[in-house]
Amino acid sequence: MTDSVVMTEMNYSPDRPKAANPVKIQDLSLRDGHQSLFATRGRTEDMIPVAEMMDEIGFWAVETWGGATFDTMHRFLNEDPWERLRTLKRYFRKTPFSMLLRAQNLVGYRNYADDVARAFVDRAVANGMDIFRTFDALNDYRNFETVVDQIKKNGKHFQGCMCYSMTEPRMGGEVYQLDYYVGKARELEAMGADSICIKDMAGLIAPYDAYQLVKTLKAAVKPPIHLHSHFTSGMAQMSQLKAIEAGVDILDTCMTPYAFRTSHPAIEPLVMALLGTSRDTGFDIRKLANINEVLEKQILPKYKHLLDDSKISVIDINVLLHQTPGGMLSNLVNQLREMDALDKIDDVYKQLPRVRKELGQVPLVTPTSQIVGVQTVNNVLYDTPEERYQMITAQVKDLCYGLYGKTAIPIDPDVQKKALKGYPRGEEPITCRPAEVLEPELEKARKDIGELAADTDDLLTYALFPVTGKKFLEWKYGRAEAPASVKPITLEQVRKTDALVKKAKAGELVEKKTDAPAKSERLRTFNVFVDDEYFSVEVDPTGEVPAVVVPVAAPASAPRAVATAPAPVAAPKAAAVTAPAADVGGTKLAAPMPGLIIRYLKNVGDQVAKGEAVVVLEAMKMENSLTAPCDGVIKAIGFKSGDTVAKGAALCVIG
Ligand code: CO
């Protein structure tokens, strides 16, 4: 086998002789492709039209499952995730299936108990899964142990991932240098990895680093090396080519309509780039073009409304500047905007490396990117010169306890101590495999869901997603009607909308509706100012009027000024409340950020000490325990679990 790429004979016909060492290709269109570009909304019915054609290409594997597909399908598409595997398997008769498995997190967002993990792998295999691409956000392979054992018991392919992460503009630095990755690859080889994947989820790997890394790994370990690199920063195609020159075995690509932006390089240019070389894929470019034709005309129009067209650039230069995933950066901006603190973004960028280091220099991938990002914002907004980490999220506490696994470097001892003060599981962090502290879950789930789960697949859907999984099973078995929002849209609907938009843009949309509904008493008038121009707009809400909490001054007698009023008109940010437990005398605990009340830990009349946790507020999917600003008795509580509150809302009064 030759590493270097050499030109062979100039025979480019589809039935040309096989290259000496063809690059193997995994197609990601049906999983990471639509996950990256279309919020994972791809429906099975839109995969079937190209399935048999894709089966003819000669892909090493097609990725069909995992990541967010399981979640999105049952929650937003009213589709049974297990059924998708069985259905697609009828069309893909030759090409193996692969899935992305979040190790002990399976396809969810927390560590599940071992009994759930084993049952999940068994059922994935039974429904048609062949290759398990397994990763852990901390690269802590103890989180692999249970699932890998089960994958092997089923005789299936275990692909071990190392999450590619950086702290410097190029590979190197204190943690993520060549030795780190070689060490990880050796661990994976020792675990029996059938292949090893460099999982560059943020598109950070630079071409010459890819070359050096692949070259070194090829010499250090036996399993085939697979490169997964998102296009986000614009480097992926160059990195792929350098990886090929270094001898990479397998690459990930998408069909063109599912490629680029935050997704992956397209397959078609790669096929042409390698044509007539010793690494020629052997693929027939005309067959690929036929697939694209179907996707472009019959399928993707249904999804284009989901494409993020807020930016003209197809790449994210910030990723190159901050070595941080693009999705994480946009989350930070959104979070700051929500708190009216967008002017602090540079402080956040500056603090991010410090907070990440204090939290153990973790790779930045879901969920660790969110954990580090939100904590950094909290620090920038709430820390004082005297005291840092004023507000620590529940997830940072879990990380400090060891619930996610072992961090790349030890967590800063002061931060860890502060985070674990009063932590319910204990103030002493664990060092064992995290799932060891979890009780079996399957039997309890079986009892809870009862006969609504007809088989083990249903039971697992419920065990993984108790709230939305149960709702889905109710739709599936006709116990409840699925809402219109989960139904697919048709090509016909898309054409109608397009025609309307075209007409409107051309200024031809002048016909006035003569059967306009009468204006109701809920009508509100808004003045909209655009530079010097001003428009008066009348807004009349239709349908059910939800009960809302209105930010009115509370009467002195009522601690909870909650009113139901028929005026939830599109007043921006009016849904959240600021002044509830108002006029009760005492010290107010004010919401430091807008968010959702998860629960109160104290009741009216309870004695609290300064610094004691009183209420848990969720913001940006992270839970924050808010503590009493002084000693005293809770005199009033402003809200209840599930309420949305604005920044500054008086959550309770202590006196
Ligand atoms: Co990916």
Image (tube, rainbow, N blue to C red):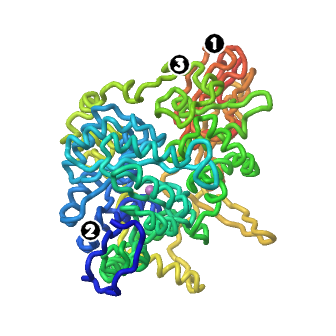
Of the numbered discs 3 and 2, the one sitting upstream in the chain is 2
Position of 111 compared to 455: left or right? right
Number of the front mark, 3 or 2: 3
Q: At 66% from the left edge and 48% from the top edge, which residue is drawn?
A: 338
Point out the tag, 2 or 1, that comes first from the N-terminus.
Answer: 2
Q: Give the residue at mark 1.
A: 607
Gap in Å between the C-alphas at discs 1 and 3? 27 Å
Whichever of callouts 1 and 3 sits on the residue coming sooner in the sequence is 3
Location of ligand 1 given as a quarter of the image: bottom left
Residue at (60, 40) in percent of width and height: 595
Judge whether residue 44 can be spotted in this image. Answer: yes
Characterize the local packing of mark 1: few (<14), some (14-19) or many (20 or more) Cα atoms within 10 angstroms: some
From the image, tell me which residue sits under label 2: 48
Q: CA distance from mark 3 to mark 2?
A: 52 Å
Judged from the image, the secondary structure of the residue bearing numbered disc 3 is loop
The residue labelled by disc 3 is 428
Place residue 632 in its image quadrant: top right
Q: Is residue 652 above or below residue 146?
A: above
Left/right of residue 153 with respect to residue 409 in the rendered view: left
Label 1, secondary structure: give it.
strand
